[in-house]
Amino acid sequence: MFENLSSRLTGTVKKLRGQARLTEENIQGTLREVRMALLEADVALPVVREFVESVRLKALGKEVLESLSPGQSFIKVVHDQLVHLMGDANETLDLAASPPVVILVAGLQGSGKTTSIAKLSLWLSEQHKKSVAVVSGDVYRPAAIEQLQTLAMQVGAEFIPSQSSESPVAIAKRAVEHSRRQFKDVLLIDTAGRLHVDEDMMQEITALHEAVQPLETLFVVDSMSGQDAAVSAQAFNDALPLTGVILTKTDGDARGGAALSVRRITGKPIKFLGTGEKITALEPFHPDRIASRILGMGDIVSLVEKVEQEVDRKQARKLAKKVRKGKGFDLADLKDQLEQMMNLGGLAGLVDKIPGNVGLQKSSKALADDRMLPRMIAIISSMTPHERRFPDIIKSTRKRRIAAGSGTQVQDVNRLLKQHLQMKKMMRKVSKKGGMQRMLQTMQGRVPPPQ
């Protein structure tokens, strides 16, 4: 997300280097580039105008701090205004009420409402230790109720059955009473969507809202719809007292215009980002962290939080102990590491949070394609346990069998074995006394300095 915007904004500030002050003259061209970058990112025009003017007023005449270049000062101004535009601080769910806390989820068809409910259920149970029930009020879309039931089983939430012959209001009222009797902390209500905003849908969802009086009313919107995301959010906000927005499919959106437009146009905070298809791919929206990502500063805090949640510490300690004892790093160990990397959101998800990542973002698509990870895991899975422990025995005949079993080419198997050999050598160096220091000294001078 924000790949194109990050590249453009980072490039524009380089033009200010070597200047003693930020003045109208030397900042005019940069502001023009910022305006174009935002428009290309599909940010709504009124938002672009207001943002650029606020940056201009904050930046003009600002003395450059002794330790900073004008470019860095300008980045600070842009960063602060981006944070302000997206809401200043994270606004989480309001759960301070007598249970069950009712959360109504609305949105257009195909925006990802049902999947977001499942992700939110898992987040509530894991992060807040809440017992969650879910119910579907979508009596129109074929298999909508069955889809929610399947997802509820995956995340461990209680599914309250409903029938397509019932009215959404009756379903919701019954679900609230059931959740109260079962002492559920939170009830999530899925609603019907349409391909576009229409009066019938709005009347139905308004009646549903009045019947259950939810504490939270969340609007789910597809980030790839760009300016349309803000327009549809405004339409729902006019009909319902929205309390927040869930922005979905952000992993497939390189522009990021919706994230910058929704808050300003609706006045409602973005509370969560859907970052992938996996049921764990949901993260709270932090404006300061997103602003840092946009400007190529990375997001170490979110990266650390993700590692804390997903990495198996016991497995990591076991591998470290094995390497220290000189037992090597076999293909089974590599498979474990690849699977943990997949849990962290893949290579693209990691690169997005690394400081100074603007130069890495485009190259990571070619060099760190996330399709490569499942392919590597498939290759190792096609090997016998003996082959994983002793990769040296894998010769031409075995390679052909492994390639056929994993649906890949022999060249892919050769590439994996070469990568494993390189990692094994690195692990051996690290395991020796003073190995880490020697490795860092070897790397020094090879890594380009941050821009």
Image (spheres, grey):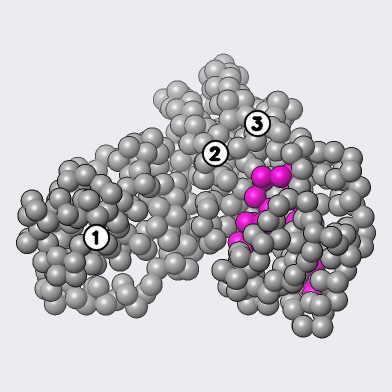
Mark positioned earlier in the residue sequence (2 or 3): 3
Amino acid type of the residue that numbered disc 2 sits on in the rendered structure = Asp
Left or right placement of residue 230 versus residue 292 in this view:
right
Q: Residues within 10 Å of mark 3 (few under 14, many from 20)?
A: many
Q: Is residue 263 visible?
A: no
**Farthest-out residue, front:** 165
Residue at 74% over, 27% down = 46
In three-dimensional space, the C-alpha distance between marks 3 and 1, rounded to whole angstroms, equals: 46 Å
Rendered view: 69 above or below 251: above
119 in the magenta segment: yes
61 in the magenta segment: no
Using the image as rendered, state which of residue 58 and residue 30 is in the foreground.
Answer: 30
Amino acid type of the residue that numbered disc 3 sits on in the rendered structure = Val
Residue position for label 1: 382
How far across and down, in percent of the image, does residue 116 sit?
64, 56
In three-dimensional space, the C-alpha distance between marks 2 and 1, rounded to whole angstroms, equals: 34 Å
In three-dimensional space, the C-alpha distance between marks 2 and 3, rounded to whole angstroms, equals: 13 Å
Q: What span is colored magenta in the figure?
A: 100-121
Residue position for label 3: 43
Residue at 28% over, 49% down = 407
Q: Residues within 10 Å of mark 1 (few under 14, many from 20)?
A: some
Left or right placement of residue 214 versus residue 255 in this view:
right
Mark 3 element type? loop
Residue at 65% over, 34% down = 226
Residue position for label 2: 253
Amino acid type of the residue that numbered disc 1 sits on in the rendered structure = Ser
In the image, which disc is placed on residue 252?
none
